[in-house]
Image: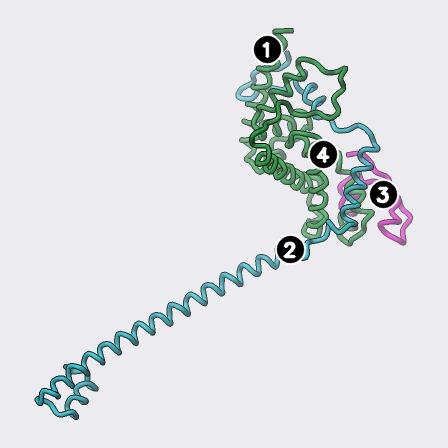
Amino acid sequence: MSAVARPLRALDGTRQARIVADGPEDERALVLAAQRGEREAFSLLVRTHERRAYAVARAIVVNHEDAEDAVQEAFLHAYRALDRFLPDQAFGAWLHRIVANAALDITRRRKVRDADELPETVASPFRDPAESSELRSRLQGALAKLPARQRAVIVLHDVEGFKHAEIGRMLGIPEGTARSDLHYARSHLRGVLGSVRSEL
Amino acid sequence: MTMEQRGLELVRDDDLTRALAAIYAAPPEAAYWTALEQRILARIDAGEGEDEWWSVPDKWLRVGLVAAGIAVIVAGSLLLRTQTQASRMATIESAVDSAATDAFEVARRGRLTEEQATLRVLIGRD
């Protein structure tokens, strides 16, 4: 988690101390302040968690725009539900479940809307043309054909470093299912990778 | 290739992981994240972070559901009780009507007086 240094004055009008939201205690203080309605505290929580939240959403949805929507919806939902959050829990884990639900919801709505026009590839909005390669485009095609859950599991595990249990909680599936999804996703993508390598 | 089979699970392939990381890379610019944070906070300030006027807090929703369940059970048992009573009354009335008709029919034929017929109805004998 990146350190975020901010004057505590906005959180507490009497103290001039500084807060660094990089430990559980500081985060707990931020959550408590946000629960009291202090906007700056919630702003700090957004700043601290938005990148990781984006990574979770991006693993589930097919493009950057949907990931961004999911992150926004998730933070709005988290703000609404903040009074039900127990500050002794891990805020990140709670938020990630909300983000995953928002992303899954967007995926479901998109599936209904785009039933007849499946994307050819998983869109990558920050694609550098110089990096473009046969492997990359084939991989994107293979990812698009992978079941959404398997795609989410391999990205969350291999790219974002989440554990099987954490992924299971986020996606609402048993840990063993996350493990087998990872196996099938790796196996499928390895096949694509292998065929590209043998052709190049 | 660094991927290999280890038991049931395939171990991570570094090339694959790198390719996936490139595809799923988050925007690197700090300005992007600042703008996203501002959009989220602007939506909260605009009232989107508040509960909708028609939404019901979970706690009250649970209380409401329990109350509705109890009301359904009470109404159901009252209805059942009323129906049972009505059915019992209908049976009694039917039996009384039938007995009265028979008794007065006998009386009309002259074998019983009206007083005897009334008495038979009251004591429930045919």
In the image, are marks 4 and 1 on the same chain?
Answer: yes
Q: Crowding at label 4, few (<14), some or many (≥20) Cα neighbours within 10 Å?
A: many
Q: Nearer the viewer, mark 2 or mark 3?
A: 2
Q: Crowding at label 3, few (<14), some or many (≥20) Cα neighbours within 10 Å?
A: some
Looking at the image, which is closer to me, B9 or B105?
B105
User: Is residue B97 toward the left or the right of residue A126 in the image?
Assistant: left
Residue at label 4? A54
Question: Is A23 colored magenta in this rendering?
Answer: yes
Q: Nearer the viewer, mark 3 or mark 4?
A: 4
Cα distance, mark 2 to mark 1? Answer: 53 Å
Looking at the image, which is closer to me, A129 or A49?
A129
> Measuring 80% from the left and 27% from the top, which residue is drawn there?
B28
Magenta stretch, residue numbers: A1-29
Marks 4 & 2, CB-CB < 8 Å contact:
no
Residue at label 2? B55
Amino acid of disc 3: Ile
Cα distance, mark 3 to mark 1? Answer: 52 Å
Cα distance, mark 4 to mark 1? Answer: 31 Å
Amino acid of disc 1: Ser
If the image is split into quadrants, where does the C terminus of chain A sit?
Answer: top right
Please tell me the numbered disc located at residue A19: 3
Residue A71, by quadrant, is top right
Q: Nearer the viewer, mark 2 or mark 1?
A: 2
Residue at label 1? A195
Q: Secondary structure at mark 3?
A: strand
Amino acid of disc 4: Tyr
Q: Secondary structure at mark 1?
A: helix
- The mark that comes first in sequence, 3 or 1, is 3
> Chain A: what color?
green
Amino acid of disc 2: Ser
